[in-house]
Image: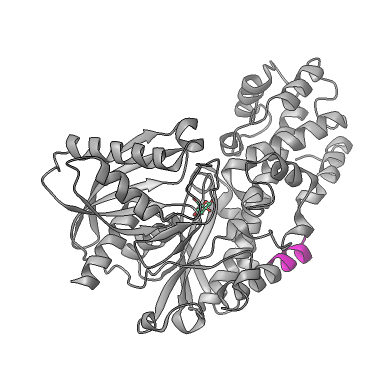
Amino acid sequence: MSETSEIARLREFLTELIPNEDQFQRLYRNFCEQIRKGLGANTNKEASTKCYLTYVQDFPTGNETGKFLALDLGGSNFRVLLISLRSNHDAEQTSKIYQLTEKELLGKGSELFDYIAKCLHEFVCENKLEAENLPLGFTFSFPCVQIGLSKATLVRWTKGFNCADTVGEDVGTMLKVAIARRQGLKIDMVAILNDTTGTLMSCAYKNPECNIGLIVGTGCNACYTERVENCERLDAKYKNKPKIIINVEWGAFGEKGGVDHLHTEYDKIIDKNSLNPGAQIYEKMVAGMYLGELVRLIMLRAVNENLVFAQCKLRKHITDILTKKPNCIETKVLSEIANDKGDDWPLVKEYLKKIFNLNDPDIDDCMKFKYVCDVVAKRAGNMLGVTLSALANKVGEKFTIIGVDGTVYRCHPNFDGYMRETLDQFIEKGIRYDIMLSEDGSGRGAALVAAVVQRENA
Ligand code: BGC
C-alpha cells in the first residue's frame, strides 16, 4: 500500500490488531501454560484448554481395508459418507450433504438426532446397504469428554449450535437411540471423534509423520499426539500404548485470560453478541464464523472516524448497513479479495457493490477495505502459527507434519503464509515442520478411526 498520510492514519488506527513480537511471545507462553494445566490431573479444572483424551491410540498404516459409514456433524451442514478403504493408501467414497436449518441448530437435541438418523436411513436405502451391518465413525465436532472411544459427553455447543437437553448427555447414546427408533436401520457405531482427530488420522494415513491436526473453518481447534506418560488423567490400562491423541479444544483458550493482551474492543463486541458470551474466546478471534463480523465492526468504526469512505456520497447509507446488518460481510469476502490488485481492484469493487450497493468506489477506499480484511486474516493466521508451534515443540519430533482442513485455510490464498510466518519464528531450532492439506478428514478420518478400532478389537 502506498503511504499517503490518510493510509498511515488507517494503519495507526489498526495497530491494536497487528500484534508485535512481544505480544506473540506472551501468547506463546500463556498457551503453553494452559496446555500444561490441561494435561495435569490436579490443574485440569483451572485450564481453559481442557486437552480432552480421545482414546485414539492406534494409527493407520495405509493398508486398512473395508467398507465404513461416517457421519460428519459440526458445521453449517451435515454429511453422510460411505467409504471403501482399499490397501495401499487408496480410498473411495460417496457422500451426501444434508442442510441444517435453525430448527435443527436451535431445537431439541433429540430432534437433531432424529433428523440425523432419518438422513442416515435415506442414505443407506439410496446406496442399497440395508442388508449390511456397517461400522460407523461419528465425527462430532464439539467439545466432549470422551469415556472410551464410543461414548462422549457434550460439554458445550459452539459455532451457532444450541440444542436443548444435550449438554451433559452422551451423544453416542443419543445417536444409537435415534437409530433404534428407525425400524430396519442396522448400524454399528464404533467411534466418536472430533474433526481435528479425523484430520490428523487422514493425513497420517498418507504420512505417518503427521502429529498435529488443525481445523480452521467455521470453528477452530487442534489436536496432537502426546506420550502417554505425560497424560496424568489417563487410566493406567491405556498406558501400554506409547501415544494418544489429545483434543486440545483451543477455541476455549482465553477464557482464563490468556489472550487479554490481544483482545480488542471489536473482539469484545463479537463475544458479547454471540450465542455463548465469555466462551470460545480464541476461536472468536481466528475462526471463519467471526472474521467477517470483525471486519464489519472495524469498518463501522473506521467510517465513523472518517478514515474510510470519508468523501463518499453514500457514506450515511454505508454506515447504516454496517450498523444494522450484522453478518453483512461474510468471511469468504476476506478470501476472495485477498489476491485482488490495484490499480483497478475488480473483486473489491464487486463486493463493495454487493454489500453497500456502491458503484465506482474511490480507489483509496478499495485499498483500505482490502487492507482491513488483510489485517484481520493475518492476525488470525499469525496467532494460529504461534499456538501451532507450541504443539510442534511439545511433540518434540525432529520433523512434524501439521494436517489441516477447514474453509478459511483452504480458501484464503495467504492464510498458509500467515501461519508459517509465526511458526518459523516460534518453532524450536532443530524441529522442522510441514503443513499438509487433509483429504476430507471428517469423512475419511472417521472411517480410519473405525478401521483401526476394528483391527485392534479383532
Ligand atoms: C469445536 C471443536 C471443533 C472446531 C472445528 C469448535 O467450535 O469446539 O470441537 O474441532 O470447532 O470444527
In the depicted structure, whether residue 436 falls above or below residue 36: above
What residue occupies the far left of the structure in this picture? Answer: 131
What is the x, y in percent for residue 19? 76, 56
Task: Tell me if I can see residue 427 in this picture.
Answer: no
Quarter where residue 149 is shown:
bottom left
> Colour scheme of this structure image?
one colour
**203 with respect to 384 (left or right):** left
Residue 214, relative to residue 217: is it above or below?
below
Q: Position of residue 403 (x, y in %)?
A: 44, 60
Q: Which sits in the foreground, 234 or 246?
A: 234
The image quadrant of residue 386 is bottom right
Quarter of the N terminus within the rendering: top right
User: Could you tell me residue 305's position as x and y percent?
Assistant: 88, 32
Q: Nearer the viewer, residue 411 or 155?
A: 155
Q: Does the magenta stretch include residue 26?
A: yes
Residue at x 40% of width, y 42% of height? 110
Residue nearest the observer in this picture, 122 or 383:
122
Chief SS of the magenta region: helix
Residue drawn where x is 35% and y is 66% of the image:
207
The stretch in magenta equals: 20-27
Is 36 drawn above or below residue 73 in the view shown? below
Q: Reply yes or no: does residue 184 show up in magenta.
A: no
